[in-house]
Image (cartoon, helix red, strand yellow):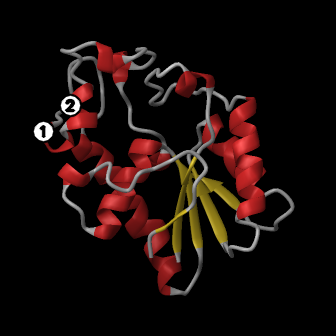
């Protein structure tokens, strides 16, 4: 089985700030969410956990798997999508011409805007390579794999595994600390 979970909440989630690769820790609510998820998913079997190296994902994985003998391996390809110079932008939806908003409303039309933001092509390329190189061989062996990551990064994995078009990029509904079974 392949499972995804998004990190717990951060102060930037609360303030509706674009996080991207900015390394923001969990807040107290996020830690509680991860601890609640630990209880809720206690009986779900995982052989291995792959995790984004960003602190909010690592901290979630560590809390979620506390007291369980499950290895946690970080991989840079599981970092959140980069929003470049738009990281830290608060309430981007209130800015009508903010180019990042296209990603949220019309992902099939999103191209990497100026300012160093990552394209969906680049995101799909790195997460696809991760799936092929690290996850697929383990699934072929019958292993249960957990990926702890982020909203856009997890959405790219869900789209690839479920063979969804980019117009349905957000259709998986990646909520904080809610386990999603993909396969």
Q: Residue at image x 38%, y 58%?
A: 157
Give SS at disc 2: helix
Relative horizontal placement of residue 108, taking residue 115 as reference (left or right):
left
Say left or right for 138 vs 154.
right
**Is there a contact, CB below 8 Å, between mark 1 and mark 2?**
yes
Location of residue 2 with respect to 19 vertically, above or below: below
Residue 90 in the image: above or below residue 102: above
Residue 23: image location, x then y, percent: 58, 27
Find the residue positioned furthest to the right: 67
Task: Name the residue nearer the viewer: 72 or 162.
Answer: 162
- Local packing at callout 2 (Cα closer than 10 Å; few below 14, some 14-19, many 20+) is some
Q: Position of residue 69 (x, y in %)?
A: 81, 68
In this rendered view, identify the residue nearer to me: 43 or 163.
Answer: 43
Q: Secondary structure at mark 1?
A: helix
Quadrant for residue 142, please give it. bottom right
Left or right of residue 171: residue 9? right
Q: Mark 1 or mark 2: which comes first in sequence?
A: 2
Residue for badge 1:
109
């Amino acid at each position: 089985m392949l499972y995804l979970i998004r990190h717990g909440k951060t102060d930037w989630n609360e303030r509706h700030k674009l996080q991207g690769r900015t390394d923001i820790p969990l807040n107290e609510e996020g830690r509680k969410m991860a601890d609640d998820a630990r209880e809720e998913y206690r009986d779900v079997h995982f052989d291995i956990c792959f995790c984004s190296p960003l602190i909010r994902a690592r901290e979630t994985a560590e809390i979620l798997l506390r007291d369980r003998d499950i290895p946690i391996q970080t991989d840079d390809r599981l970092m959140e999508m980069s929003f470049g110079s738009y990281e830290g932008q608060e309430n981007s939806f209130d800015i009508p011409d903010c180019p990042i908003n296209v990603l949220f409303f019309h992902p099939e039309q999103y191209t990497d805007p100026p300012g160093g933001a990552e394209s969906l092509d680049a995101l799909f390329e790195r997460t696809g390579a991760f799936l092929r190189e690290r996850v697929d061989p383990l699934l072929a062996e019958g292993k249960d794999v957990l990926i702890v990551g982020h909203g856009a990064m997890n959405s790219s994995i869900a789209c690839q595994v479920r063979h969804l078009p980019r117009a349905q990029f957000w259709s998986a509904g990646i909520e904080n600390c809610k386990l999603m079974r993909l396969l």
